[in-house]
Image (tube, rainbow, N blue to C red):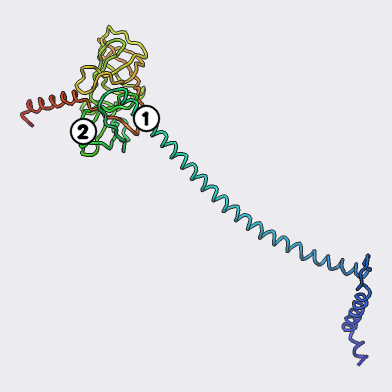
Amino acid sequence: MWFRLFGNRRLLILLTSLVLLIIVMSITGGEREQLSWPEKVFKSSVAKVQALFYKPAGIVAGFFEDISRIRSLHEENTMLRQKLEDYLRLQNEVAELKKKQSELEKLVDYTEEWKEDYVVAQVVARSPDRFNDVLVIDRGREDGIRPNMPVITPEGLIGRIESVTDSMANVQLLTSSRSEGMLNAPAIAAEVRERDAFGIIEGYDHEKEALILSMIDSDVELKEGDTVVTYHQSEIYPPNLLIGTVEEVGAGIYGLDKMAFVKPTASFHRLQYVMVVQDSEKIEVQEHLDETDRDENGGD
């Protein structure tokens, strides 16, 4: 039996190692300040083995921590981006509300200064055709709106009512071009305030972005910056509605009169609110002219 036991080399090595381990444990069982050399060798070997496993394990753990951190940062970034978009949207809404408030305040100040009857209307649509520039407003026949009524902003005249339904109306702007065969954008009787000179606004030059004032007496000496307003005997427009200022003066078509380019005082960009002028005297004149036309045409 002992021969077989000692003949098995692997078993002998295992038993010898076990005995040595027990002896080492018995020797080092108490409290000591220094470790014995077997303990040092054993701990050093264990430490190296632990290091071999710990480093890859740490890398794997760090990898999953990085993934978790990236996911968290992505969620946080998404949340911050959404908050930024909400903030910018609110900022734009506040700016738009402030602009509307400013425009309405100007309208109120204007109506208090100029004692006319006005209907304030909001622009709900606009034609994309610059040569037939038309606004649609949210006031109509039920609000007392009639064709040819002047339409203004606090800065000045912008056009006239072209057509009306019960609840809406089309506004033909001064920036519409007149051409042969077109009934829109009718001529406007105007006068140069500083020169007491008469003229006709009969078109708009899109290149110069200016109204065309023609049929001015050749003896009138116009100057740049002269004020152009509606004529006091106009059939449609009340007197002294501000139109614009003289920007350039030239000779008329046949050289017998003068013409001028007039820069509108009113802005035609981003129109949101306008005022329709309800001049009772002009309404009566217009009704009288309409009735006269019907009589001349046999009541048609």
**Cα separation between marks 1 and 2:** 23 Å
Residue 270 percent location from the top left of the image? 37, 33
> Looking at the image, is mark 1 or mark 2 earlier in the sequence?
1
Residue 236 percent location from the top left of the image? 21, 23
Q: Which residue is mark 1?
A: 105
Find the residue positioned furthest to the front.
Answer: 112
Q: Which residue is mark 2?
A: 144
Q: Can you tell which of label 1 and label 2 is closer to the viewer?
A: 1
Quarter-wise, where is residue 220 in the image?
top left
Q: Residue at x 28, y 31 (%)?
A: 132
| Amino acid bearing label 2 | Gly
Marks 1,2: beta carbons within 8 A: no
Q: Residue at x 27, y 31 (%)?
A: 119
Residue 182 visible somewhere in the drawing: no
Quarter-wise, where is residue 137 in the image?
top left
Above-or-below relation of 8 to 284: below
Residue 88 percent location from the top left of the image? 49, 41
Q: Counting other residues with Cα less than 10 Å from the Cα at mark 1, is it few (<14), some (14-19), or many (20 or more)?
A: few
| Amino acid bearing label 1 | Glu
Label 1 residue SS: helix
Q: Counting other residues with Cα less than 10 Å from the Cα at mark 2, is it few (<14), some (14-19), or many (20 or more)?
A: few
